[in-house]
Image: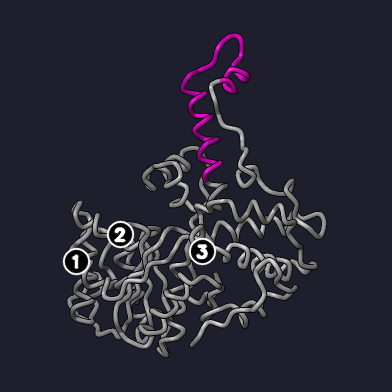
Amino acid sequence: MQLNVVDQTTTDLPKVNSESFLVNTSFAGIVSECSKMNSVFAVIQKVAKTNSTVLVLGESGTGKELVARALHHLSGRKGKLVPVNCGAIPEEILESELFGHEKGAFTGAVANKVGRFQHADGGTIFLDEIAEMSPKLQVKLLRVLQEKKVEPVGSTRSIPVDVRIVAATNKDLREEVKAGRFREDLYYRLQVVPISLPPLRARGADVALLTDFFMARACENLGIETVEFSPEARDKFNAYSWPGNVRELENLIERLAILAEGKQINLQDLPDYILGHQQDCTILEIGEFMPDAGVSFNELVDQFESKLITMALDKTGWNKKAAAELLNLNRTTLVEKIKKKGLAQEIEVVCDNDPIRPF
């Protein structure tokens, strides 16, 4: 399968709906004109119909799950694609989710449960945030890779499964191995075919292309006429580094489409962080808000910490891993802070039957 691209430059794209983007500029539902992504597509095409384990590497928001969906879509496998976010499910629950459990295996196990590996039999299982998996579960996963069988919690029987494994992480697993947090033997089992995704800032004209695609789709969903971008607004989009990658772009476009008051997005419609002149929390600004009688130091620090965390979350479309990277914090530490401050959103549960979604 070859990637078809339009002849026009991105800035001269005709007014089209989101479906025509998929016809003209996509590979397995992935919208791109970037040569780096074409290299990714070539690897996907070669490995899709094999049973080889694939390790997808890339920053948060670059589309790792969508690569897994493309691999499954092109594989010809008749079973389901079953995604599992290893970082979003507590360890004591993740084992049961992956491998299932027998009735009475632990407190609350009132019935037998079929695990995700069995649900994916004949299909593909996508293990996102694989670096967050505990050493105990890494051992069990290694056994599945070696024996092609799963053993439910509380059971001594082994159940054969025909499952293609695609794993993903935004961490350097080699460094995790050196630090003793990830098993070396499991690392080599997973990275039979590694696929590295470039960040959006390295994808050149894809920023403009995806901007048009997401806006066309957002306007279709809202039932409104397509909103255009002024040249100045496009320049700001192209100059921005997009730390939250494609997910950040998609979320911002949806917000702009909803709030648009006319048929064009102008500079004044863009958030301050895109414009590059957001105000910083400096000592001078603190002085403006400090009352004559003084203020509680801890209270003031807490207020500014909350503001900083909120800014990072807004900037990354509430992607906690990307926000943690912006703040140079451990993801677990950030999650604890936003929960303590009442800023946390509920964890988004990934449905097994999500359709292939372009990025």
Between the C-alphas of marks 3 and 2, the distance is 26 Å
Badge 2 crowding class, 10 Å Cα cut-off, few under 14, some 14 to 19, many 20 or more, is many
In-image side of 15 versus 48 (left or right): right
Q: Which residues are magenta?
A: 284-312
Residue 140, percent from left and from top: 21, 69
Q: Residue at x 37, y 59 (%)?
A: 170
Q: Type of residue at label 1?
A: Val
- Mark 3 and mark 2 in contact? Answer it, CB < 8 Å: no
For disc 2, the marked residue is: 131
Residue 161 among magenta residues: no
Q: Which callout, 2 or 1, points to the residue nearer the camera? A: 2
Magenta: main secondary structure equals helix
As drawn, 160 above or below 106: below
Q: Position of residue 62 (x, y in %)?
A: 47, 63
**Residue under circle 3?**
203
Helix, strand or loop for disc 2:
helix
Asked whether residue 117 appears in the rendered view, the answer is: yes
